[in-house]
Amino acid sequence: MTDENAKVEIYNRVNRLKIKAGGTHGGGPGKLDVKAVERANAVIQKMSDMYPAEIKKSLEELNAIWVDVQALPAENRKDTAQKMSNTANQIKDLAGTFGFDLMEYFGESLRDYILNIDLSLPEQIIIVQAHIDVMQVAYSQNLKNQEHPLGEELKKTVAAAIAKYS
């Protein structure tokens, strides 16, 4: 049963996020302050000097977790693998922020691969190790983009491991 005399009230709530991003309450297009964007880019550029140290720290953390994972019985690896996935995601984000798209690619690939497995099979171990190895090479060679010949070769290495052991 419906009440044909029932009133419907519509609330038009203020979209505060849109307003913060430069939009208007009335629905007009947003506009970001060019000076604010320039200031943010300047801060990121200043922080780019920190990238090598930060990525090194993240790779060391990833390696430490990897050692821990391998020491666990196969049936107990899932929870620790989640830590690896989180660290790989941090590497992806850090590399992406500073324009290291090859490392971003490997961080994302490792994160996504680990999310779908439990690291209980030897084949999974080989694929994760391939990711970690190529990330170490990309870092040590300071490879920034995927189009670099060595970057292409590293991507092929991971793809071959995935194809062979999946």
Image (tube, grey):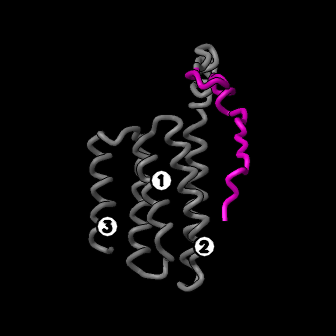
Q: Give the image quarter of residue 9.
A: top right
Decide: marks 1, 3 in contact (CB < 8 A)?
A: no
* Quadrant of the image containing the C terminus: bottom left
Q: Give the image quarter of residue 49.
A: top right
- Residue at x 43%, y 82% (from the top left corner): 121
The residue where tag 2 is placed is 68
Q: Nearer the viewer, mark 3 or mark 2?
A: 3
> Nearer the N terminus, badge 2 or badge 1?
2
Position of residue 19 relative to residue 82, above or below, is above
Q: CA distance from mark 2 to mark 1?
A: 19 Å
> Nearer the N terminus, badge 1 or badge 3?
1
Magenta highlight on residue 121:
no
Residue 153 — which label? Answer: none
Q: Which three-letter amino acid code belongs to the residue tagged 2?
A: Asp
- With 8 as the anchor, is 38 left or right in this view? left
Q: Position of residue 97 (x, y in %)?
A: 53, 37
- In terms of depth relative to the viewer, which is nearer, 132 or 19? 19
- With 81 as the anchor, is 130 left or right in this view? left
Mark 3 lies on a secondary structure that is helix
Q: Residues within 10 Å of mark 1 (few under 14, many from 20)?
A: many
Mark 1 lies on a secondary structure that is helix
Q: Position of residue 122 (x, y in %)?
A: 41, 80
Q: CA distance from mark 3 to mark 2?
A: 22 Å
The residue where tag 1 is placed is 107
The residue where tag 3 is placed is 161
Q: Which residues are magenta?
A: 1-30
